[in-house]
Amino acid sequence: MNRRHFLRTAALAVAAFAGRAVAAPLAAAEKFFKEPPWRRKKPYWGYAVDVAKCIGCGRCVDACKTENDVPREPFYFRTWVERYVLRRTGEVSVDSPNGGLDGYPAPREPESIAQSFFVPKLCGHCENSPCEQVCPVGASFKTVDGVVLVDRKYCIGCRYCIQACPYGCRYFHPELQVADKCTLCYHRITKGLQPACVENCPTGARMFGDLSDPESALTKFRETERIQTLKPHMGTEPKLVYKGLHKEVR
Amino acid sequence: MKDIRHLLHVAAAFVVVIIGFLIARHLVVPKSFGRIGHYRADAVDEIKALPLRYAGEQACAPCHRAQAKAKASSRHKGIRCESCHGALQAHAEAPSSLKPAKPKEGEMRAFCARCHEKNLSRPAKFPQVDPREHNPGVACSQCHPPHQPK
């Protein structure tokens, strides 16, 4: 064995061992980041809506405004209910008078309607939330249990986040002059209560629970039903899922 | 020698600016910022401490056993007390401090219609009536006890 041969063999051996030494932690890191965060953290909150159960009574909208001091005027909503009307002509119309707070009048021209249903909307507490990413000061953030919140004392009121949310789930609070949004009733869920909208839903169309608990009703719902999120192509990965969503729903 | 003095001036200016920046940063950035993530950790506690308005159904049953029991075996079992009676945390803490609302006879038909009025947009299997045709003029509660509708 000459010196050159020895050096080459040694270098190959070192490279092989170095490769193995790096590969294991890399695989672990990859697994860590691919795995949903609720495998790692307990609790981790999620939400589901069963569209076929919603009767459009608006109790949730009222409860949300009451619980969270959301201004009563239209345009200020942390959650609202939309009504879709699909006509036989193919025309699709969506309305939400006062967010559904006062209920819905019967739709006009019932003969021409192919389908009509209600869709409750709220913040999806996205895993990759655009609103959190655009905040210039760190006033929008995600808690360790997966809830996207706004720090009212730190928000400078620049409204970037309101622009950034593809779901329209934020509004500018007219009195506090800060961005405001659904907190999943963080002050309730951390005390073992349900969010006000879930508490007040008469039909069980709204569901809230712990994604990290394999036995929770929400986990079971996600595992047994065919669920969807809104605007999946945006890559936001909302933790709000819908069952029975029509393709026209945006 | 003169060149080094120049450099020392610049270095001193840098040190002053950096120290000034650190002091300003210390004064401006809130104490708890960054403790958990890129946000003010105290904000989480502030939001947790917001006041409750809805007590939740489990709070009502100990004092209103009759209504809770009636409702638990009825078609209205899925509806929480406060969906119909409003936010009652204050009442649940001190019953005399807040007298809960309950729909009056005259408002009953509109109150029940909120959920039960016939509407094409509602799921077809949900029980619905047309209040103009379904026993008009009589309060719904005369025939359907609200806590145990039949």
Image (cartoon, rainbow, N blue to C red):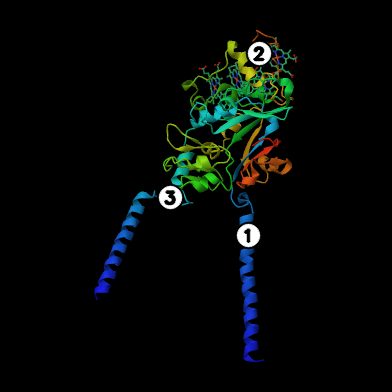
Instruction: Name the residue located 69 percent from the left edge and 21 percent from the top edge.
Output: B119
Residue A148 screen position, x and y as percent: 53, 43
**Which chain's residue wears label 1?**
A
Q: CA distance from mark 1 to mark 3?
A: 29 Å
Relative to B135, residue B29 above or below = below
Instruction: Name the residue located 57 percent from the left edge and 30 percent from the top edge.
Output: B56
Residue B130 screen position, x and y as percent: 69, 15
Left or right, residue B54 beside residue B112: left
Q: Residues within 10 Å of mark 2 (few under 14, many from 20)?
A: many
Left or right, residue B43 beside residue A113: left
Determine which residue is flagged by label 2.
B140
Determine which residue is flagged by label 1.
A30
Q: Could you tell me the amino acid type at mark 1?
A: Glu
Instruction: Name the residue located 64 percent from the left edge and 84 percent from the top edge.
Output: A8
**Which chain's residue wears label 3?**
B
Q: How many marks?
A: 3
Determine which residue is flagged by label 3.
B33
